Image (spheres, rainbow, N blue to C red):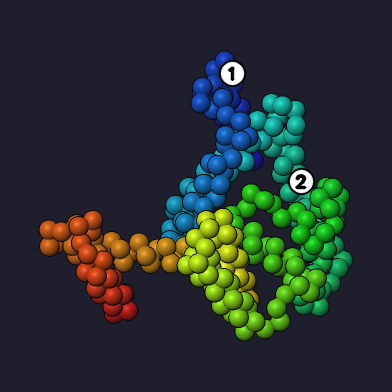
Amino acid sequence: MESITRLLDLMAQLRDPARGCPWDVKQTFASIAPHTIEEAYEVVDAIEREDHRALCDELGDLLLQVVFHAQMAREQALFDFDAVARGLTDKLVRRHPHVFGDVNFTDETEQHAAWEAVKAEERTHKGEGSGALDGVARSLPALLRAVKLQKRAARVGFDWPEVERVIDKIEEELEEVRHEVIETRDRDRCEDEIGDLLFAVVNLARHMDVDPEAALRRTNHKFETRFRYIETALAREGREAATTSLEDMETLWVEAKGVERAG
């Protein structure tokens, strides 16, 4: 608690209009929001790299975002850090009646259903509506939001029962993309169909219990590693990618894949 108190006092000092930091003083909820998102992703990056020292540091940066927002809210008499912590504590108790109450669940499925029921009740209490898709934040990354929308719809039976039907849907959407790209070249319609294709691929990932965001990050890393291999190989020959033919780079790309498999 001493560390938290010192951190809160420090944040208040940084935000002091007379003696604080000019940059910190001029910030708002909106201007800080992108930093909050960035810090969350840096936490994930440290986890994926299994760098626990960096994880500790990044969690501190993420905590700073919470403290920053809480201090700005306190200045406007909206709420403070204590209200944030108290609300979180109450929520955890409310959502875990099998730990903090006398409820017993027979299995994980029953526990998950009860968890979702409590969350739905909370959304209704906050005036977010009782529809299956209510409460899914619009500001979520598109892939994550697609998964959440699909999961919500699946809970009320709107879902393909077999994964083969999902693959059929992907092939159908791909053909529609092909038609728009080759036949019409209409940018708006191409964007619409590509969006449908991405949504269908996310649906496949969900059915296979694969996190599409993590899968794409993995592919991004794989692409980056292979492309850097191409650049390094060309540099050894005194060449640059910008002046190398696509055929030559594809040859090196295949070579990079072979190195991966051998490693």
Find residue 184 and report its horizontal and vertical position in percent. 52, 63
Q: Which residue is mark 2?
A: 87
Q: Using the image, tell me which numbered label, if any, was put on residue 17.
A: 1
Which secondary structure, mark 1? Answer: loop
**Residue 34 sits in which quadrant?**
top right
Q: Is residue 15 left or right of residue 74?
A: left
Viewer-proximal residue, 136 or 197? Answer: 197
Q: Going by the picture, which residue comes out furthest to the front?
A: 183
Viewer-proximal residue, 22 or 192? Answer: 192
**Residue type of the residue flagged with mark 1:** Pro
**Residue 100 sits in which quadrant?**
bottom right
Find residue 259 and report its horizontal and vertical position in percent. 27, 75
Q: Which residue: 79% across, 58% down? A: 119
Tag 2 or tag 1, which sits nearer the N-term?
Answer: 1
- Residue 238's place in the image compared with 70, above or below, is below
- Residue 4's place in the image compared with 224, above or below, is above
Query: CB atoms at circles 1 and 2 under 8 Å apart?
Result: no
Q: Which residue: 54% across, 74% down? A: 175
> Which class describes the residues within 10 Å of circle 1: few (<14), some (14-19), or many (20+)?
few
Find residue 188 and report its horizontal and vertical position in percent. 56, 55
Q: Going by the picture, which residue comes out furthest to the top?
A: 18
Find residue 6 and report its horizontal and vertical position in percent. 59, 33
- Residue 45's place in the image compared with 218, above or below, is above
Q: Can residue 88 be seen at all in this image of the molecule?
A: yes
Q: Is residue 22 left or right of residue 151?
A: left
**Residue type of the residue flagged with mark 2:** Gly
Which secondary structure, mark 2? Answer: helix
Instruction: Find the distance from the CA under tag 1 to the CA under tag 2.
Output: 29 Å
Q: Which residue: 53% across, 65% down? A: 180
Q: Can residue 209 be seen at all in this image of the molecule?
A: no
